[in-house]
Amino acid sequence: MERKFLVVLLISLLLLASCSTQTLNYSGETENWSADLKVNQTSDDYQSQELVLKYKGDDVNEVGPIDYNVDSLGSFGRGGVTLKENGTIVDSATSNPTNAKVSEHTEVEVTVEWNEKTETFKLSKQ
């Protein structure tokens, strides 16, 4: 009985260890924009990134379509995107085990273009 318990415990610990994830959070802002980036890395070397970009101004309708890019190890972004009513955009990207992974020391930079204006700012690890 005791031996079966140890085997079950060992298997459970191995399964828990194989399902571990690491989460890194970055944020930054300018006069007009704020951004939060959440990076989830799994033990199988996949990585997902979720960006929340928010316009800090009063009138979201004055912004029009925007282009944005998140640059770290690799990059992702979109062009011609319209803000939601609350002034945000939520976007995500996933990378496979062959891509370089974001680490605690990775520099992350966001560039936003709108109404013939451009702002570039760094996100700091939280």
Image (spheres, rainbow, N blue to C red):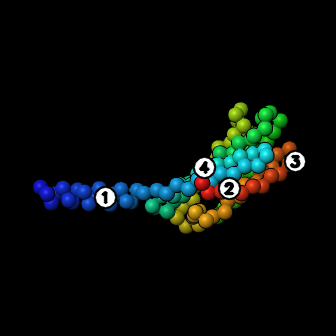
Foreground: disc 3 or disc 1:
1
Label 3 close to label 2 by CB (< 8 Å): no
Disc 2 residue type (three-letter): Leu
**Which residue appears at 21% of the width and 60% of the height?**
7
Residue wearing tag 3: 116
| Residue for point 65% across, 57% down | 124
Q: Is residue 104 left or right of residue 7?
A: right
Q: Earlier in the sequence, mark 4 or mark 3?
A: 4
**Label 1 secondary element:** helix
Q: List the residue tagged with mark 1.
A: 13
Amino acid beneath label 4: Glu
Residue extending furthest toward the left: 1
Q: Which mark is residue 50?
A: 4
Circle 3 residues within 10 Å: few <14, some 14–19, many ≥20: few
Can you say which quadrant of the picture contains the C terminus? bottom right
Coordinates of residue 16 in the picture (x, y in percent): 36, 56
Residue located beneath label 2 in the image = 123
Q: Which amino acid, mark 3?
A: Glu
The CA span between labels 3 and 1 is: 55 Å
Which label lies toward us, 3 or 2? 2
Q: Amino acid at mark 1?
A: Leu
Q: Earlier in the sequence, mark 3 or mark 1?
A: 1
Return the x and y of residue 121 as percentages of the image width and height.
75, 55
Dot placed on the residue nearer the N-terminal end, 4 or 1: 1
Say left or right for 117 vs 12. right
Gap in angstroms between the C-alphas marked 1 and 2: 36 Å
Quarter of the rendering containing residue 43: bottom left
